[in-house]
Amino acid sequence: MKTSLFRNTLMAALIAQAFTFAHTAAAADKIIKIDGSSTVYPITEAVAEEFQRAKGVKVTVGESGTGGGFKKFCRGETDISDASRPISQKEMDACKEGGVQFIELPIAYDALTVVVNGKNDWVKQITVAELKKIWEPGSKVKNWKEVNATYPDKPLNLYGPGTASGTFDYFTEAVNGKAKASRTDYTPSEDDNVLVQGVSGNTGGLAYFGLAYYLENTDKLKAVPIVAKEGAKPVLPSEATVMDGTYQPLSRPLFIYVNATAAAFRPEVKAFVNYYLENAPELVKEVKYVPLPKADYTAVKEHFKAMKPGTGFNGTSEVGIKITDLLSRIK
Amino acid sequence: MEHKASVLENLADVRAMIKRHKRNDTLFAAIGLLCLMFGLVTLMLLFWQLIADGYPKFNIDFLTEFPSRRAGRAGLLSAWVGSLLVMVVTFLTAVPVGVAAGLYLEEYAPKNWFTDLIEINVSNLAGVPSIIYGLLALGLFVYMLDFGQSILTAGLTLGLLILPIVIVSTREAIRSIPVSIREAAYGVGATKWQVVYDHVFKYSYGGILTGIIIGMARALGETAPIITIGALTFIAFLPPSPITTEPPFLNFEWLSSGFTVMPIQMFNWLSRPDHAFHVNAAATGALIIIVTLLMNGTAIWLRYKIRKNIKW
């Protein structure tokens, strides 16, 4: 008994001593720190895995969400921030205050997919106007009949991401015309698998989420072709329709924000970003997202090489923007 | 005569009453058993489902591989090592502080309003949601003390979280020592510390240990506070080894290393679109439950063993 108590005290003393060690150690190692959006996470994880295997540089990736990621990024705690939406004005101010300059790099597309139950045989397409009627703030639509008079008399059950999600922001912007403006009487979940389960267990269900979650559940769910404007052709989300720009307005670019100082002065960070852009076409596809067209990756690479800091957005996201236009805005 | 008659007269009533009361007895026993089964069967079914789902991943590779974007290749290595190291810090902080605090409150502290206040606080702290500890730790350890998002921060946070459990169980264990033991020790001239250390602490050791292990088992499954302080999700390397081949043979760099723990890895896999990852998540869940059960089992066994050695 005596010895074990002695051992405990000794260890407590060692721990206390360790507090002093804790700091000095962190600065020395070359770890690339990444945090941010959980939507972009699978892509960055894939790149980090391969890069670490190939170059032996340590990379860590967190998923605090786009907002949480920017908080750390603007305090200079991370080297790269994953983002499923452009940086906001508030976050730009925070970065300025923290003395962090960033390089904005689009790295892939995500197609927000509107899905219905696999047994739903009446919806062949949906117009953005119909989506708006369903999802706009204060909407009272509770039955498929109210969406379109030709649809059967079936209750409409809505599922969607929570309000903290970038998917929610983009969808509401694209459909309702204002980010975060949405009806609130739907079943929200931050976990897309819960939305998948909701719709697959409910014949009258409808939800929206990233394409990857639909592609893994095609046996239970049906994607609805989107009609962008009156008279336009209905378009199903797919790699081809997103890449050629016809899947509108629900395809959105995903970004990484690179700390400009880290990119300029730390060769491993620069090497990582180059590796990211070089291997994105295959790796993005592998994790079921849509890569940018080849020419766009070349443009993004040039942009990174030129080390142009700043954003092409005004602190808000835009629907249907071209990557090349975006890059050319940053001088 | 009359008295005897009345008993005989009421005999049927009395029998009916006894029967009714016996029926209530059985009824309550049945309800109690049902309630017990409800909890137990639910846990068993959940556990069974986790094992059935995660079964393909029950192999050594799962424990020796780093996380990966390919579900088949992904393993738990960084997560279980992270969990283990965090637990080490938690143990080394919560146990000495908690046991000492419990001993002090029970044996030394004077009975006044200040001690009462502390007591109420300790009991309340045991009921505070764990996310609150995460927020406290984010402000205190991560930013004010600048420990960063490290194993040290996580270990200290979970240490704080289980501190009330350790204190309360220490006090309860101490309270079960009969006063006569203390009086006997004082009677032969022992000092307070001799009484506390050689008798009170030694005899209540089993109970204290149980509290510690149950606290540690709780800390192992905690996710919310660890996410709040900023644990990573993808980390494909291990923290620097605590033991080195050169003097002084101990290395403390691991304390400041980034990390992930098993519940976070499980959460991440569960939120993936690819169903193959859900198998990994189920296997991780089963592993966490098995480890927790083993810890609790050890606690029960140790308590039994230590109690057997006490001869009053």
Image (cartoon, rainbow, N blue to C red):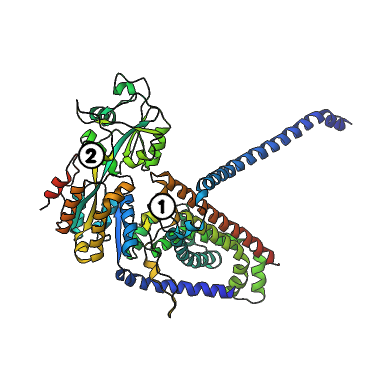
Residues beneath discs 1 and 2 located on the same chain: no
Label 2: which residue? A179
- Left/right placement of residue A149 relative to residue B294 reads left
| Relative image position of residue B218 (x, y in whole percent) | 50, 55
Quadrant into which the N terminus of chain A falls? bottom right
Provide the chain ID for the residue under circle 1: B
B106 or B134: nearer the eye? B134
A40 or A246: nearer the eye? A246
Name the residue type under label 1.
Answer: Ala
- Which residue is farthest bottom? B247
- Left/right placement of residue A23 relative to residue B292 reads left
Labels in figure, total:
2
- Which residue is farthest left? A331
SS for dot 1: helix
In the image, residue A13 sits, relative to residue A279, either above or below, namely below
Provide the chain ID for the residue under circle 2: A
- Left/right placement of residue A94 relative to residue A24 reads left
Label 1: which residue? B224
Name the disc covering residue B263, or none.
none
| Relative image position of residue B29 (x, y in whole percent) | 67, 40
A211 or B125: nearer the eye? A211
SS for dot 2: loop
In the image, residue B160 sits, relative to residue B33, either above or below, namely below
Q: Are the residues flagged by discs 1 and 2 in contact, CB closer than 8 Å?
A: no
Mark 1 and mark 2: Cα distance apart in space: 29 Å
Name the residue type under label 2.
Answer: Ala
Classed neighbour count for the residue bearing mark 2: other residues with Cα under 10 Å, few (<14), some (14–19), many (≥20) = some
The residue located at (33%, 70%) in the rendering is: A23
Classed neighbour count for the residue bearing mark 1: other residues with Cα under 10 Å, few (<14), some (14–19), many (≥20) = some
